[in-house]
């Protein structure tokens, strides 16, 4: 008989916005229960968080190593089915490695690691152990993003020419932006990039997901506007794609007054599309020979993939959590079926790390273009 | 020690949109588990739905009478804490009556009953049995609706003068709009009104919630555009309020092409506000002496009530399910604390029934105004 | 050989917003020169205004009676071709009467007169003297309003069911709103209505222009929110049309913070349209079986009438003045050709006065409906 | 006594969109009459256009050389006051040179010439002959662009950090886009750049006008998506400014379905602004510590410069032609007063040519940055 999947969480204690998002999204599926975890490095806070989430006391662990060992020792009808990793970037790799190596499936926050070498090692392990690896690029969970992908796959836009992605937010405009901000601009915890790792990777992933194109070369300008900050808080990247299309990613965390303004625009030779994360129910289609069309989630013109990722009738707005939960639903289905599903995996993780490495390398030099392999 | 509340559901089987919404919203809170239910009148479908939701087989009941009796007979540590009623209108009253009379708290879909007399009987029972009664007017759960209420309570709009609410949707524009539509225009199941009962009541409730004003008189024109339909599918209501303000509710289910376009505009002598259910994160403030301001959920200018009803940082859109879940969170807290909370209750139910009765009476006559008492 | 038409103006001196609008719009056509005028009752200001507009000194007249006499006495190659009347309402009738009676064509501000009797007398004169009479309802000059009319005429919306017009502005929210406001709420100068005469008539005219439907019955609630004001500053009107459609006009001049928020929504059984005067380049089309379409001025999907009323490529916004100038262009063409054209005339004037009289009569009584004949 | 200025036009005959725009804008001012011209190289068409515009037959000239000579020979009370040049780029320089050299003021379409050397020669002549030189970058004429400049000058945005300008249109997405398109991608007529010369220069000019910053270095990627086209139809330019700010201009004429989508976003360390040419009445202000504010033309929050550039009350939309006319009004005032005014002049022309030359040079090489001097 069907049972809920058991999820274990590493990271995501009180104060970490994204941990609670993972928990709500997992609950929304109705398919997953939170069964174990290490909710941060502060033991007291971890216990408090676990209790709040109705996790049995004996499965709120001291650290991830203990958790892996203890869960691996549990019988199959109690053991967690998969681990969710929502720590700062620094720990993604060792934790994912440990769970994979012990036979657990993994859902990991982005960026997947600190380097492409780490990402490739996770890919090796995932394949070797036949694990399901999910990478939480939640924007791919939006119904109208799926619809965008469908339109492009169906050739509705014709030959793709230009892809522009903007991701603006202002939360790092001032020097002190709180604890969650702090680790994101600390190289020891965040890695080789700040802004680009935090949000530029969403742009890269979204482009790959929607268009299927791969970046072949890029030219980047990173900037650090806040004095003393050690990583980029802003950047622009010119892109060349494998089909000859050009593109542009501009991401900033010092865009004063912007909340999470992610905008995707894709121009083909027949038509173009625009999707905005803050009004995610609309997919705007433009062409030179017809009126503007706005495809709406749940409305005629929006197809099967979008419908499958939808919970409500048109006009009742769905948002970020629903998209997040869609990733979890697809991941849960993959965990059950042992088949790949419609969510970013470890390949996307390798890609995002190569993207970051190419940006940082290009920025450091004075040649215009750097290949991305 | 804290435990999750146990919820029992009547109605809401497969095909009924709102039942699944209740279940997702309840899950989102993390505080509620679905423990029992009758998921429609078709036994097989009810069983399938219950199993899908991990409800133990022995608590998927034949009918609500059996359910009330069986649950009342269970020990306190197994018995449901409250019942959710999401059947067609016709059954709200007897089911709510049965649960209340047996000591259960109740969360009920709107409109609460078939008449104000029934609503008043539920109010009597609720008070007599000291029960918690929740009425699911979900729009009151939106953070920026709460912010609107706060601004008005703080006098930011000055003396209120004009209140306009539009609720347009097009799903009943054609004669056959499916099973869910069918009962809504069947007097035996829906009651004395179709469109006004289905969505006009949301408008009335929203006005009461946000402004605290009461309607004293109204003038109504109902219409039935689809031939053979036996209840209104459209209507306009002119309103007079107890403070001298005037208002307008226009609701339609034959507004071709509209999804769920609910718009609230309130004008005071100092400032005005506008809130739209399809872009619920914005609260637009206008005045004659300042630029337009858009207050955003999670952003400076949005206060404590909105923040408490919020799960995500600004710019990550929340929507309908989150608002729905806010009603459940507040209801759950009330069930635990036995104190009233920030959600519509049985008084709102009595009010909405008097509103409907006044509309129908006014429409039937040729005098301009009908008092609403 | 072609020559510019000569225009004479009565009213519209410094401080009167609409006079300058008429002059700019007339200039935009390139077909009209301002040749004579009485620019208000203050002789010095009138002279200053006329000189500013390059009107020869000897044709800046003392009063309209002098102007009619003097212009009628001029030879045909100097005499004005038509008179524009942009005084307060009170003087529309006598001035129009004088010019018509002396053989001049007339362009008049709305509302055309103080009563339907006056309007009918102007109609009689217009017909008798075979004059061209233009009534400045400028919203009918917008390209996408013309496109809306075209779509309805072509049956794109199917059978019309519901017509809602909102016109909100806030300029009269406070007691003292300046000189231009003062006469609009003075019965001696404005007539039997304030808000409804000033902006409600635009709504009535727009509905007639776009749909071709006639109002058969109405029910009205007028309000005066500012103490001591002698005419309505707000009102709502329920409408019944000759084809069975229902409608709603709600207009307010105390809608704090609103600028000139005119919104037209028309629902048919096949599709619906929405047009907003503040974003006039868009015509939104909705239906139950297709994505939202936004028809844009100058873009495929927008037809011949809109194109003919357009000066710029799509994406270069046109606005209020261009619409106004379109009325002038059509009027100028009618003056030259002696044929009726695509602009509101004296029939629209009679209609708007009957509309106002029906509203005021209905408001004064306690019966719900008043016929409009 | 005051008189209208006499304008002569070179170019702008039938079929050339921008010529008629110049004429309408000039008429709107009420200060300018079209007195002479060469309306294209086809004599018959030129005559037809001139007659249509009421230009006396004897002042519709054969070519610009004849026109310069003939007008220079006329007495001062008949001679044109200034010449407007709206030919393809190739002829801007010789025509401007001829008029300047003969003592006429000049209003010229952009880009001002074919090279910065030509632009500098025009600057030399302008200074030497003490002429007024206007460069038609019409976006600087919008009231809310002036308001944006005011806010930045007042320090409301703090230290500027990031400036992003997008200008997307789709008219060149297909190979054959008509006569007006043809010359814009012909190096002999357009110069060294297509898209960047046509619309990228608007972006550069707008940035300079609004911020006062100068570009010090740039990195560019030009693209030509339509096969066989000999100039760029798309490009992205990374910018570095003299105050340390960074920026981005991305312009495309193959953005299928876009009309004239010009968007300006400027981020400072205190606040940010956004202005869109298609909704030009709004200026959106964002900051990290306050709600979004939308400043509207004609409304409190919008200051003196915007008001001076405004003709209508708030809420009656003004657009492209009004902005264009504002440039003409300021230019006319400068012609009368012999004082510089608030419109782009020959310095802006030199700047735009250096901008284009730097882009083309950078694009041709593989070094990331090119200085712009």
Image: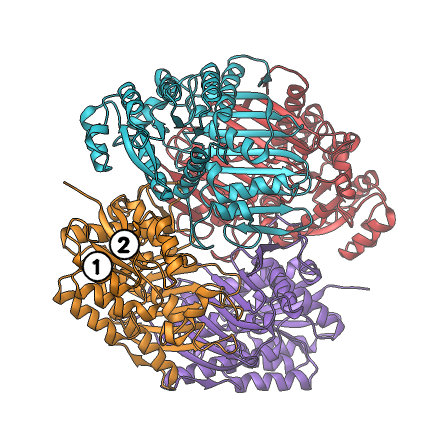
Chain colours: A purple, B red, C cyan, D orange
The residue labelled by disc 1 is D70
- Judging from the image, mark 1 belongs to the subunit labelled D
Image quadrant in which you'd find residue B131: top right
The extreme top residue here reads C365
**Numbered-mark total:** 2
Task: Tell me which label, 1 or 2, sits earlier in the chain.
Answer: 2
The reply to whether discs 1 and 2 touch (Cβ–Cβ < 8 Å) is: yes
Crowding at dot 2, Cα within 10 Å, few <14 / some 14-19 / many 20+, comes out as some
Which label was assigned to residue C285? none
Provide the secondary structure element on which disc 2 rests. helix
Provide the secondary structure element on which disc 1 rests. helix
Residue A166 rendering spot, x and y as whole percentages: 46, 66
Most foreground residue, A80 or D355: D355
Instruction: Examine the rendering and report whether any part of residue A228 can be seen.
Output: no
- Judging from the image, mark 2 belongs to the subunit labelled D
Image quadrant in which you'd find residue D164: bottom left
Asked whether, in this view, residue C76 is left or right of residue B232, the answer is left
Residue at horizontal 64%, vertical 53%? B3
Most foreground residue, A268 or C119: C119
The residue labelled by disc 2 is D59
How far is disc 1 from disc 2 in space, using C-alphas?
9 Å
Residue B303 rendering spot, x and y as whole percentages: 43, 46
Q: Is residue C3 above or below residue D75?
A: above
Asked whether, in this view, residue B148 is left or right of residue A149, the answer is left
Q: Is residue A297 above or below residue B86?
A: below
Image quarter in which the N terminus of chain D is found: top left
């Amino acid at each position: 008989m069907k049972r809920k999947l058991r999820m274990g969480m590493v990271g995501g204690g009180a104060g970490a916005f994204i941990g609670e998002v993972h928990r709500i999204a997992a609950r929304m599926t109705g398919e997953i229960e939170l069964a174990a975890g290490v909710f941060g490095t502060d033991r007291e806070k971890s216990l408090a968080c676990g209790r709040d989430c109705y996790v049995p006391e004996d499965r709120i662990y001291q650290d991830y190593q203990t958790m892996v060992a203890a869960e691996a020792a549990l019988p199959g009808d109690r053991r967690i089915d998969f681990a969710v990793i929502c720590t700062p970037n620094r720990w993604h790799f060792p934790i994912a490695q440990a769970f994979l190596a012990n036979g657990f499936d993994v859902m990991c926050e982005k960026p997947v690691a600190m380097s492409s070498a780490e990402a490739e090692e996770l890919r090796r392990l995932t394949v070797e152990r036949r694990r399901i690896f999910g990478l939480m690029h939640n924007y791919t969970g939006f119904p109208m993003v799926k619809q965008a992908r469908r339109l492009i796959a169906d050739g509705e836009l014709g030959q793709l020419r230009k892809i522009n992605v903007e991701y603006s937010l202002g939360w790092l405009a001032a020097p002190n932006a709180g604890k969650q901000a702090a680790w994101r601009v600390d190289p020891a915890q965040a890695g080789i990039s700040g802004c680009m790792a935090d949000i530029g990777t969403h742009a890269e992933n979204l482009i790959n997901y929607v268009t299927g194109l791969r970046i072949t070369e890029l030219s980047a300008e990173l900037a650090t506007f806040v004095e003393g900050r050690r990583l980029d808080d802003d950047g622009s990247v010119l892109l060349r794609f494998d089909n000859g299309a050009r593109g542009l990613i501009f991401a900033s965390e010092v865009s004063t007054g912007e909340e999470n303004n992610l905008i995707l625009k894709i121009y083909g030779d027949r038509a173009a599309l625009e999707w905005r994360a803050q009004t995610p129910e609309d997919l705007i289609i433009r062409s030179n020979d017809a009126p503007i069309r706005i495809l709406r989630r749940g409305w005629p013109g929006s197809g099967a993939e979008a419908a499958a990722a939808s919970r409500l009738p048109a006009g009742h707005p769905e948002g970020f959590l629903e998209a997040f939960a869609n990733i979890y639903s697809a991941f849960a289905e993959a965990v059950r079926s042992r088949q790949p599903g419609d969510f970013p995996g470890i390949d996307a993780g390798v890609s995002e790390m190569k993207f970051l490495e190419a940006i940082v390398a290009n920025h450091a030099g004075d040649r215009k273009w750097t290949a991305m392999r």
